[in-house]
């Protein structure tokens, strides 16, 4: 028996009991089920407070105002009925009472006095030392009802454009922090008893245990509706036991497939042409390098989306799958439970893919398998942890040794960072001589740099953008593997070090991450401080 059938049976029993009660009391019984949601309400006859207090509801006023009908329940005071009869009789008016069930009374009262929607204040990000804002947000979060607090937090994080929510157990409370534009901000300190609510929600939604003494990973989705539009928020959940309870980090992915587009990464024509030329080839290895949170996955997915045509078989191996994209085969690799990228890659190569994306190259086995796949007719895209494009070669050589096959397979290495973008309230200023000297040294010979006209910009905080920044900007260092670079990989050059590889790449026209950042600062897109912080 489903829930609706159970509810129907329960209501049936209640109406039967009410009819029997009416017979005992000598009152007419009224079954309202056929009209309780649609009959017009009689307004301004009784105040709502009295309807709540005395369990009485006006049903109808007719006969030129001389005939009144009211619905009552078994909880309505009998003294009130006599008093009303006396009052109406003295005015020469007729009054009738009908006994209804408690469920019918609740339905009518929800129409007469609908619950007021509680609107909580939006969460604000506090600037450094701003304890008042943190206190206000803490008070709001502590006041949000139990069943809504988790959804409220997710909605507010999405509204702020946060990439992570950190829920951290302290000795005397819970600290909530959010990462916005790459910076972690304190948001609130809330009561310890809210920990049970958060962990309860995570347990049921993300399939993690609230009592585990081991790190756990989970995944959940929720739909966010804003300004009449709805989008899906993918949430990766990581928990770890600490001294005072399980801390949790929620990584938010506001998935919109249309945003996975190379045109939206702010690439120059030359950069875009280089990527197009490499990924249009049927084979080769492309590596994305950078720290966690530098946007590697988004760029890789954008490349995959550009290649996603009906004449290509595309397979991805991911731990975990961050975005679901139509038209490609995505395979989860659970490395926590013994899964391996290398083993998965060997398996999918039997499916004859044209393009394979490997979530991350973490070991020599995966690296060698990816290299082998890239020279046997497959285009292989992957991420790899290194600080720069040149460092990626050094790290790969440390991992697998000098390898002639690697030198013939690797075609492009991209290093990426994200810096905060200045908002429109920015203010221009002329840098001091030390800054000018630094810029002239670092950008010497770069064609887009004018050493005689150097202007920089600084953030101006506003109510809309309290830090003077809005969103983030992609900085991308692209190293095309030339014959000169291949010599380092093959072992033809004895001195294999990052600075030598970078020097050769720069001579061939590569702009480093630092140079890209400085040019962005000169264009007014970011600041020197941001470039220094990130690079």
Image (cartoon, rainbow, N blue to C red):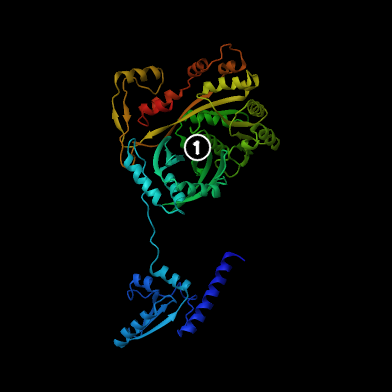
Quadrant where the image shows the C terminus: top left
What residue is at 37 percent from the left and 22 percent from the top?
A: 449
Q: Can residue 22 be seen in this view?
A: yes
Place residue 404 in its image quadrant.
top right
What residue is at 49 percent from the left and 31 percent from the top?
A: 272
Left or right position of 430 against 244:
left
- Mark 1: which secondary structure? loop
Does residue 416 lie above or below 482 as drawn?
A: below
Left or right position of 104 against 6:
left
Q: Name the residue under label 1.
A: 243
Does residue 198 lie above or below 35 as drawn?
A: above
Residue 518's spot in the image, x, y percent?
39, 25
What residue is at 40 percent from the left and 21 percent from the top?
A: 447
Q: Is residue 122 visible?
A: no
Considering depth in this image, is 304 or 20 the residue closer to the camera? Answer: 20
Does residue 468 lie above or below 284 as drawn?
A: below
């Amino acid at each position: 028996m489903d829930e609706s059938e159970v509810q129907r049976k329960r209501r049936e029993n209640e109406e039967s009991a009410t009819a029997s009660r009416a017979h005992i009391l000598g009152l007419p019984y009224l079954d309202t089920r056929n009209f309780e949601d649609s009959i017009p309400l009689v307004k301004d006859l009784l105040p709502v407070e009295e309807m709540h207090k005395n369990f009485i509801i006006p049903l109808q006023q007719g006969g030129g105002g001389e005939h009144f009908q009211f619905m009552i329940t078994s909880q309505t005071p009998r003294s009130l009925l006599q008093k009303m009869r006396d009052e109406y009789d003295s005015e020469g008016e007729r009054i009738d009472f009908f006994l209804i069930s408690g469920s019918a009374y609740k339905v009518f009262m929800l129409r007469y006095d609908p619950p007021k929607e509680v609107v909580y204040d939006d969460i604000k990000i506090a600037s450094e030392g701003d304890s008042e804002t943190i206190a206000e947000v803490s008070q709001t979060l502590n006041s949000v009802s139990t069943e809504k607090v988790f959804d409220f937090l997710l909605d507010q994080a999405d509204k702020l454009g946060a990439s992570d929510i950190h829920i951290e157990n302290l000795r005397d409370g819970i600290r909530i922090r959010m990462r916005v534009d790459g910076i972690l901000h304190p948001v609130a300190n809330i009561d310890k008893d809210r920990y049970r609510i958060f962990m309860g929600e995570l347990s049921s939604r993300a399939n993690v245990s609230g009592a585990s003494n081991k790190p756990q990973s989970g995944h959940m989705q929720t739909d966010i509706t804003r300004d009449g539009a709805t989008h899906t928020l993918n949430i990766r959940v990581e928990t770890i036991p600490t001294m005072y309870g399980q801390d949790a980090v929620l990584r938010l992915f506001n998935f919109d497939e249309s945003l996975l587009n190379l045109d939206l990464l702010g690439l120059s024509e030359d950069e875009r042409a280089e990527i197009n030329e490499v990924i249009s080839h049927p084979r080769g290895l492309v590596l994305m390098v950078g720290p966690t949170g530098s946007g590697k996955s988004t760029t890789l997915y954008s490349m995959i989306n550009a290649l996603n045509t009906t004449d290509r078989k595309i397979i991805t191996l991911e731990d975990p799958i961050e975005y679901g994209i139509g038209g490609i085969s995505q395979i989860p690799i659970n490395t926590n439970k013994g899964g391996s990228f290398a083993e998965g890659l060997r398996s999918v190569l039997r499916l004859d893919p044209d393009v394979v994306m490997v979530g991350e190259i973490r070991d020599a086995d995966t690296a060698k398998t990816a290299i082998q796949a890239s020279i046997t007719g497959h285009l292989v895209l992957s991420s790899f942890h290194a600080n720069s494009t040149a460092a990626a070669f050094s790290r790969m050589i440390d991992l697998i040794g000098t390898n002639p096959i690697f030198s013939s397979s690797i075609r492009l290495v991209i290093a990426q960072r994200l810096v905060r973008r200045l908002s429109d309230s920015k203010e221009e200023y002329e840098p001091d001589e030390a800054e000018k000297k630094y810029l002239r040294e670092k950008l010497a010979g770069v064609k887009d740099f004018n050493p005689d006209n150097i202007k920089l910009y600084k953030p101006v905080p506003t109510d809309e953008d309290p830090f003077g920044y809005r969103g983030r900007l992609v900085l991308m260092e692209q190293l095309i593997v030339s014959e000169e670079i291949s010599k380092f990989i093959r072992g033809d050059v004895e001195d294999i070090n990052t600075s030598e590889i970078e020097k050769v790449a720069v001579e061939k026209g590569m702009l480093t991450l630092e140079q890209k950042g400085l040019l962005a600062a000169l264009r007014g897109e970011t600041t020197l401080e941001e470039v220094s912080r990130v690079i």
